[in-house]
Image (cartoon, rainbow, N blue to C red):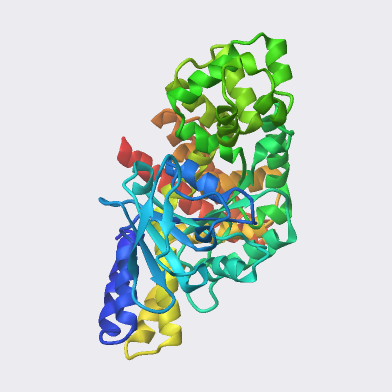
Amino acid sequence: MSLIDRTRAVLGQAVTVYQGTEHAGRLAAVRERLDAPLRVAIAGRVKAGKSTLLNALAGERLAPTDAGECTRIVTWYQDGHTYQVQATPKRGAPRQLRFTREDGAIDIDLGGLTAAEVAQLVVTWPAQALRTVTLIDTPGIGSLTEQNAERTWGLLVPDDEETPADAVVYLLRHLHANDIEFLRAFHDTEVSRPSPVNAIGVLSRADEIGVGRLDSMASARRIAARLGTDPNVRRLVQSVVPVAGLLAETAVTLTEIEVAQLRRVADLPVRQAEELLLSADRFANAMPELGLTNLEREALLARFGLFGVRLTSTLLRREVATTATDLSRELAERSGLTQLREIIGSLFLERRDVLKSRSALLALAETTRSSPRPGGEALAASVEEIMASAHPFNELRVLSSLRAGWITGKPDVVTDLEHLIGGSGSSAGDRLQLPPDASGAELSAAAGQALTRWQRRAENPMTTYEMAVAARVAVRSCEGLLAGLGQSR
């Protein structure tokens, strides 16, 4: 029986045990959550670009990016057959809200409610990107308004129950003390709490690091790489990816009209184009013969930023991309959005059953602890047995211990262990550090060599106790790889 099936079964027993209590409905909802898309929260400090990045991941401009009322409310974006917005007030029943959408983000009418009176908003929107993941937009950490920040803390770091989010994408502009405090609170040493494998760091607004120069993203990648190897950061997030959020959002919503307008800049002689793009003010006002109105120029700056206008006009001039479709793909790649999507896919979506099972088991464990019932002890024992015996949880424990510095060894040994237990992705190629096009024979040979290598390390009396425990987990991972490759053949 798979991990998700074992979790579903124990939740079914829990619904029966708690039948007739206030917990029965909640546990039934937790069981249904196992079949729902993965829930990923977008968190970070104020003005880090959370809503902009959410729009890029959703593939549409849905979340408002201004400082309106709705940006102070936790907002869920989920796929559905209809377009609707539902508010859950702190007091009273949920209600449908009116909304409009005119050439941009959704404008929600709170219907007389204030942001302080709304616990959360749920936006249902038919979108392909939302079929596999539900995105949660959160107010900024470190907000000047303490109540706004508390909404995010309450969602992702609740005091007395599980977090509704299965994973988190945390936006960093600089490594601030508030960032470390939040991520440490979000994590826990137990597998039932989120661990570093459940969190990705994003170096947001990466194009601003190089002051909008064409090589800004190269500078951002170097900084992100240094952050990713920092011991303090490694304990908190799985990876750090640089993303130019505004350009990423524009890449997935690019129009032919915008491409035609930017071609006017691309058609200028190089020296004139460089002079025009020296600053945002010059681009907005200089060279009236360009044939773009001030409103059109300001709209381009709002959509692309100065870095995006420079990059896009250069790509058009060099004919790297000639159509809106080609340009959209190129901008997604250069903004860092493509890399982020790949990492979310390998670290979150490929582990979705593990992450959702973890969230569900945490909910059940908390219920049995806080509200004992006849039969509750057996449920708690079942939860403990699943957590202790399920190999994916053992991998998470080892990965968390590696990131926390509790398991140490030679750098190449630690790197090998991290990959084998899925620290860089769950596919056989990721675990064995082989290219995506590696053949089955190559994968099997590498898995066999890894099995022998880690069996010897586990049995070596000179191996430290912590590494020996981790080695036995790695052996089990290698056996699973070989079994899976045998089935695939």
Q: Residue at x 66, y 39 (%)?
A: 206
State which quarter of the image contains the C terminus.
top left
In this image, 188 relative to 478: left or right? Answer: right
**Residue closer to the observer: 4 or 281:** 281
When asked about the image quadrant of residue 397, the answer is bottom right
Q: Residue at x 46, y 34 (%)?
A: 252
Q: Residue at x 31, y 68 (%)?
A: 31
In this image, 14 relative to 104: left or right? Answer: left
When asked about the image quadrant of residue 178, the answer is bottom right
Tell me how many marks there are. Answer: 0
Give how far across and how far down residue 435 sits, in percent: 50, 30
**Residue closer to the observer: 416 or 472:** 416
Residue 6: tell me if it is visible.
no
Give how far across and how far down residue 466 sits, in percent: 64, 62
Residue 366 against residue 7 in the figure, above or below: below
Give how far across and how far down residue 57 sits, in percent: 47, 43
Q: From this viewpoint, which residue is outermost toward the top?
A: 269
Residue 401 against residue 200 in the figure, above or below: below
**Residue closer to the observer: 143 or 400:** 143
**Residue closer to the observer: 345 or 442:** 345
State which quarter of the image contains the N terminus.
bottom left
Give how far across and how far down residue 137 sits, in percent: 50, 56
Residue 200: tell me if it is visible.
yes
